[in-house]
Image (cartoon, helix red, strand yellow):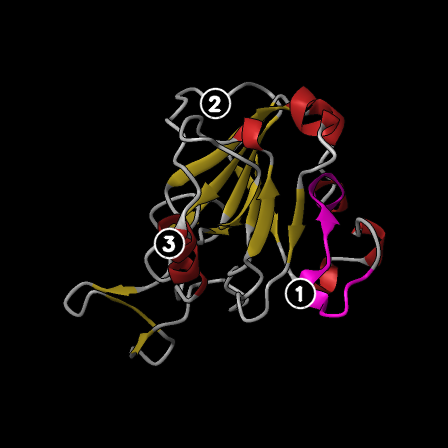
Protein backbone atom coordinates (compact mmCIF):
# COMPACT_ATOMS: atom_id res chain seq x y z
CA UNK A 1 0.00 0.00 0.00
CA UNK A 2 1.47 3.34 -1.00
CA UNK A 3 -0.06 6.42 0.66
CA UNK A 4 0.72 9.84 -0.81
CA UNK A 5 0.22 12.79 1.53
CA UNK A 6 2.39 15.68 0.30
CA UNK A 7 4.13 14.20 -2.72
CA UNK A 8 2.54 13.55 -6.09
CA UNK A 9 1.31 10.02 -6.75
CA UNK A 10 3.66 7.92 -8.84
CA UNK A 11 3.08 7.43 -12.55
CA UNK A 12 1.02 4.33 -13.34
CA UNK A 13 0.53 2.59 -16.68
CA UNK A 14 -3.15 1.60 -16.47
CA UNK A 15 -2.81 -0.79 -19.42
CA UNK A 16 0.10 -2.72 -17.93
CA UNK A 17 -1.07 -2.11 -14.33
CA UNK A 18 2.36 -1.09 -13.09
CA UNK A 19 4.34 1.84 -11.79
CA UNK A 20 6.56 3.35 -14.46
CA UNK A 21 10.05 4.79 -14.32
CA UNK A 22 11.19 8.01 -15.97
CA UNK A 23 11.67 6.20 -19.29
CA UNK A 24 8.09 4.90 -19.22
CA UNK A 25 9.00 1.26 -18.56
CA UNK A 26 7.41 -0.75 -15.74
CA UNK A 27 9.41 -0.76 -12.52
CA UNK A 28 9.23 -2.88 -9.38
CA UNK A 29 10.66 -0.08 -7.25
CA UNK A 30 8.35 1.39 -4.61
CA UNK A 31 7.94 5.14 -5.28
CA UNK A 32 9.86 7.41 -2.89
CA UNK A 33 11.12 4.37 -1.00
CA UNK A 34 14.73 3.86 0.01
CA UNK A 35 14.38 0.25 -1.09
CA UNK A 36 14.68 -1.17 2.42
CA UNK A 37 12.03 -3.79 3.17
CA UNK A 38 11.27 -4.21 6.87
CA UNK A 39 11.56 -7.98 7.29
CA UNK A 40 12.35 -8.02 11.00
CA UNK A 41 9.75 -8.18 13.74
CA UNK A 42 7.85 -4.89 13.52
CA UNK A 43 6.97 -2.69 16.47
CA UNK A 44 3.74 -0.64 16.36
CA UNK A 45 2.53 1.97 18.84
CA UNK A 46 -1.16 2.84 18.58
CA UNK A 47 -1.22 1.57 15.01
CA UNK A 48 1.90 3.36 13.75
CA UNK A 49 5.05 1.40 12.98
CA UNK A 50 7.92 2.86 15.00
CA UNK A 51 10.61 0.42 13.94
CA UNK A 52 11.61 -3.14 13.26
CA UNK A 53 14.20 -5.44 14.75
CA UNK A 54 17.65 -5.42 13.23
CA UNK A 55 20.35 -7.62 14.74
CA UNK A 56 22.82 -4.71 14.90
CA UNK A 57 20.35 -2.63 16.96
CA UNK A 58 20.03 -5.27 19.69
CA UNK A 59 22.72 -4.36 22.23
CA UNK A 60 24.40 -6.13 25.12
CA UNK A 61 22.64 -3.67 27.46
CA UNK A 62 19.37 -5.44 26.60
CA UNK A 63 20.76 -8.86 27.55
CA UNK A 64 19.30 -10.91 30.39
CA UNK A 65 21.88 -13.07 32.14
CA UNK A 66 25.25 -14.06 30.72
CA UNK A 67 26.13 -14.28 27.04
CA UNK A 68 25.61 -17.75 25.55
CA UNK A 69 28.20 -19.65 23.54
CA UNK A 70 25.93 -19.38 20.50
CA UNK A 71 24.82 -15.71 20.09
CA UNK A 72 21.44 -16.88 18.75
CA UNK A 73 20.77 -18.29 22.25
CA UNK A 74 21.32 -14.97 24.03
CA UNK A 75 18.26 -13.74 25.93
CA UNK A 76 17.21 -10.09 25.81
CA UNK A 77 14.52 -8.12 27.66
CA UNK A 78 11.50 -7.20 25.53
CA UNK A 79 10.91 -4.05 27.61
CA UNK A 80 14.47 -2.88 26.86
CA UNK A 81 13.96 -3.55 23.15
CA UNK A 82 10.89 -1.31 23.16
CA UNK A 83 12.68 1.36 25.17
CA UNK A 84 15.49 1.24 22.60
CA UNK A 85 12.89 2.23 19.99
CA UNK A 86 11.87 5.23 22.13
CA UNK A 87 8.70 3.56 23.40
CA UNK A 88 7.74 4.81 26.86
CA UNK A 89 7.12 1.38 28.39
CA UNK A 90 5.64 2.87 31.55
CA UNK A 91 2.72 4.24 29.49
CA UNK A 92 1.79 0.92 27.86
CA UNK A 93 -1.84 -0.02 28.48
CA UNK A 94 -1.91 -3.24 26.46
CA UNK A 95 0.61 -5.22 24.44
CA UNK A 96 -0.08 -7.93 21.87
CA UNK A 97 2.28 -10.27 20.02
CA UNK A 98 1.42 -11.40 16.51
CA UNK A 99 2.41 -14.44 14.48
CA UNK A 100 1.20 -13.67 10.98
CA UNK A 101 -2.47 -12.75 11.44
CA UNK A 102 -2.80 -14.57 14.79
CA UNK A 103 -2.55 -12.95 18.21
CA UNK A 104 -0.48 -15.38 20.27
CA UNK A 105 -0.05 -13.26 23.40
CA UNK A 106 -1.68 -10.35 25.16
CA UNK A 107 -1.00 -8.59 28.45
CA UNK A 108 -1.87 -5.39 30.25
CA UNK A 109 0.99 -2.93 30.53
CA UNK A 110 1.10 -3.56 34.27
CA UNK A 111 1.45 -7.33 33.89
CA UNK A 112 3.98 -6.95 31.08
CA UNK A 113 6.23 -4.69 33.16
CA UNK A 114 5.83 -6.90 36.23
CA UNK A 115 7.00 -9.98 34.34
CA UNK A 116 10.71 -10.76 34.41
CA UNK A 117 10.20 -13.73 32.09
CA UNK A 118 9.29 -11.87 28.87
CA UNK A 119 12.48 -12.21 26.88
CA UNK A 120 13.48 -12.75 23.27
CA UNK A 121 16.26 -14.23 21.20
CA UNK A 122 17.40 -13.72 17.62
CA UNK A 123 17.50 -17.05 15.78
CA UNK A 124 19.90 -17.27 12.86
CA UNK A 125 18.58 -16.95 9.30
CA UNK A 126 15.24 -15.46 10.35
CA UNK A 127 15.74 -11.98 8.84
CA UNK A 128 15.32 -10.25 12.21
CA UNK A 129 12.17 -12.16 13.15
CA UNK A 130 12.31 -12.55 16.92
CA UNK A 131 11.61 -15.61 19.07
CA UNK A 132 9.81 -14.50 22.22
CA UNK A 133 9.66 -16.41 25.49
CA UNK A 134 6.01 -15.88 26.44
CA UNK A 135 4.74 -16.36 30.01
CA UNK A 136 1.79 -18.76 30.31
CA UNK A 137 -0.56 -16.05 31.60
CA UNK A 138 -0.14 -14.05 28.36
CA UNK A 139 -1.20 -16.99 26.16
CA UNK A 140 -4.43 -18.76 25.21
CA UNK A 141 -5.51 -20.69 28.28
CA UNK A 142 -6.46 -24.36 28.42
CA UNK A 143 -4.69 -27.62 27.63
CA UNK A 144 -2.12 -26.97 30.32
CA UNK A 145 -0.78 -23.68 28.96
CA UNK A 146 2.81 -23.09 30.01
CA UNK A 147 5.56 -20.60 29.29
CA UNK A 148 6.95 -21.30 25.85
CA UNK A 149 8.82 -19.82 22.92
CA UNK A 150 7.21 -18.60 19.71
CA UNK A 151 8.28 -16.63 16.65
CA UNK A 152 6.70 -13.16 16.49
CA UNK A 153 6.23 -11.08 13.36
CA UNK A 154 4.83 -7.94 15.03
CA UNK A 155 4.40 -6.41 18.47
CA UNK A 156 1.39 -4.13 18.89
CA UNK A 157 1.71 -1.60 21.72
CA UNK A 158 -1.33 0.38 22.83
CA UNK A 159 -0.74 3.53 24.85
CA UNK A 160 -3.77 5.73 24.14
CA UNK A 161 -6.39 3.00 24.47
CA UNK A 162 -6.88 -0.74 24.52
CA UNK A 163 -7.50 -2.59 21.22
CA UNK A 164 -11.03 -1.91 19.93
CA UNK A 165 -11.65 -5.55 19.06
CA UNK A 166 -10.02 -8.15 21.24
CA UNK A 167 -9.45 -11.16 19.02
CA UNK A 168 -9.24 -14.63 20.48
CA UNK A 169 -5.74 -15.75 21.32
CA UNK A 170 -4.22 -18.52 19.22
CA UNK A 171 -2.05 -21.11 20.93
CA UNK A 172 1.64 -20.98 20.05
CA UNK A 173 2.45 -23.90 17.77
CA UNK A 174 4.48 -25.04 14.80
CA UNK A 175 1.74 -23.53 12.62
CA UNK A 176 2.13 -20.05 14.11
CA UNK A 177 5.92 -20.31 13.79
CA UNK A 178 5.53 -21.30 10.13
CA UNK A 179 3.37 -18.25 9.38
CA UNK A 180 6.14 -16.01 10.75
CA UNK A 181 8.80 -17.81 8.74
CA UNK A 182 6.75 -17.30 5.59
CA UNK A 183 6.49 -13.58 6.40
CA UNK A 184 10.28 -13.46 6.80
CA UNK A 185 10.75 -14.27 3.11
CA UNK A 186 7.91 -11.99 1.94
CA UNK A 187 9.05 -9.39 -0.58
CA UNK A 188 6.71 -6.76 0.88
CA UNK A 189 5.05 -6.30 -2.50
CA UNK A 190 1.50 -7.11 -1.38
CA UNK A 191 0.93 -5.78 2.14
CA UNK A 192 -2.42 -6.58 3.73
CA UNK A 193 -1.95 -6.69 7.50
CA UNK A 194 0.11 -5.22 10.37
CA UNK A 195 2.71 -7.86 9.44
CA UNK A 196 3.27 -6.46 5.94
CA UNK A 197 5.21 -3.40 4.80
CA UNK A 198 3.40 -0.10 4.35
CA UNK A 199 5.24 2.75 2.66
CA UNK A 200 4.22 6.34 3.25
CA UNK A 201 5.28 9.14 0.93
CA UNK A 202 5.08 12.28 2.99
Residue at image position (71%, 23%) is 91
Of callouts 1 and 2, which one flags the residue occurring earlier in the amino acid sequence? 1
Give neighbour class at mark 3: few <14, some 14-19, many 20+ (Cα, 10 Å).
Answer: some
Distance of label 1 from label 2 (alpha carbons): 32 Å
- 50 or 83, nearer to the observer: 83
Give neighbour class at mark 1: few <14, some 14-19, many 20+ (Cα, 10 Å).
Answer: some
Report whether 108 appears left or right of 35: right
Q: Quadrant of residue 66?
A: bottom right
Is residue 82 visible to us here? yes
Residue 179 badge? 3
Question: Picture coordinates of residue 172 (x, y %)?
Answer: 44, 42
Is 70 in the magenta?
A: yes
Report whether 202 appears left or right of 12: right
Q: Which region of the structure is painted magenta? A: 67-81
Q: Dots 3 and 2: beta carbons under 8 Å?
A: no
Residue at image position (35%, 72%) is 28
Residue at image position (43%, 53%) is 177
Q: Give the structural element (helix, strand or loop) at label 3.
A: helix
Name the residue furthest left. 15
Judged by depth in the image, the label closer to the viewer, 3 or 2, is 3
Q: Is residue 86 above or below residue 126?
A: above
Residue at mark 1: 72
Residue at mark 2: 163
Q: Give the structural element (helix, strand or loop) at label 1.
A: helix
Amino acid sequence: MAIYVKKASASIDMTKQCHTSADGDCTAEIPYSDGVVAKGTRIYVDGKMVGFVKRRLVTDAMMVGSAATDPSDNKYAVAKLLAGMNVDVASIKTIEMMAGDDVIARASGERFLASTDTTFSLPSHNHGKVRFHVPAEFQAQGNGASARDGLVSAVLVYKSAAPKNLRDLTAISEDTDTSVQVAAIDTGSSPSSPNKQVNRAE
